[in-house]
Amino acid sequence: MELIIFLIIGALAGFAAGLFGVGGGTIIVPLLFIVFTQMGYPADNIMHLALGTSLATIIVTSISSLMAHNKRGAVMWPVFKNLVPGLAIGCFFGAGIAGQISGLYLQLIVGIFLLWVAYKMFVGGKNKANNSASNTNAVLPSKPKQLAAGGVIGIASAIFGIGGGSLTVPYLTRYGVVMQKAVGTSAACGLPIAIAGALGFMIFGMQAQVNVPNTIGFVHIYAFLGISIMSFFTAKIGAKVAHILSPQLLKKCFAVLLTVVGCYFLYKGLF
């Protein structure tokens, strides 16, 4: 029964990721939080399990996304190489930081983050067209600054349980990288983030001696398998549907969804 529930979550997360053009973590974390709560898992471990499992599933989906973007020449590999050490180290230790934060505070942090992403989706669409049509000459910071930026993005990705796209894309476009290459490079960056973050949540979770069945540290194995399998296929369906519908309407609908989920986390954390 558990596996069926996780397959359904994977189907929804993959479809939403393809439909709205965002990482599945923004869908997976809230859904896993609700499911793990209903399963009666320890309250202070639920948020950590949702975050760790979310990052583990992103390993599979990021490989698919990376291959697709690389075929179109949209991955800036020199930038990727500069960001990766910071991303991996930051995300690994970010998992340790998350492990030290109580489940209650994690709910509040993730809730605020989701509201921020929703706000950016509401107001950010106007600037995308300008960015993709111009600013062809990107001028990125020095390698040490890119390394440091990768560390910050990695830490945040672990705490929020995301692949980093919500942070990497704005960082790259800020310095004049066209949207297509920013998204492609961000997709590539999602892989080291997910691997390092998942390992971190496993290791720090084992040290915390999590008393939940079918888990390795803060990663739920059945949830990882079910979500990964289904999201891999349904993301392609979501992407096809996205080309039929209005992108601006889709983004606004998703922003509304994130607002509702963000408010739900804040409500659960405060009351």
Image (cartoon, helix red, strand yellow):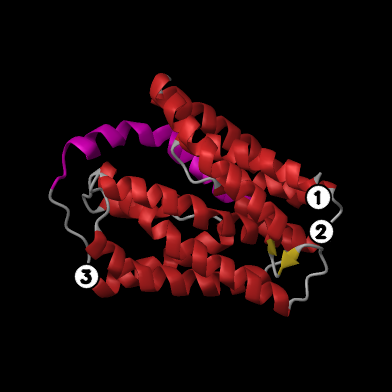
Q: Are marks 2 and 1 in contact (CB under 8 Å)?
A: yes
Q: Residue 240 location, x and y as percent?
A: 43, 27
Q: Amino acid at mark 3?
A: Ser
Element type at marker 1? helix
Number of the front mark, 1 or 3: 1
Element type at marker 3? loop
Residue 142 circle label: 3
Can you identify the residue that label 1 sits on?
A: 37
Sequence-wise, the earlier of marks 2 and 3 is: 2
Farthest residue, direction bottom: 207
Can you identify the residue that label 2 sits on?
A: 43
Residue 261 figure quarter: top right
Residue 134 figure quarter: top left
Label 2 – label 3 distance at C-alpha: 43 Å
The reply, left or right, for residue 226 in relation to residue 76 is right
Tell me the magenta residue range.
111-136
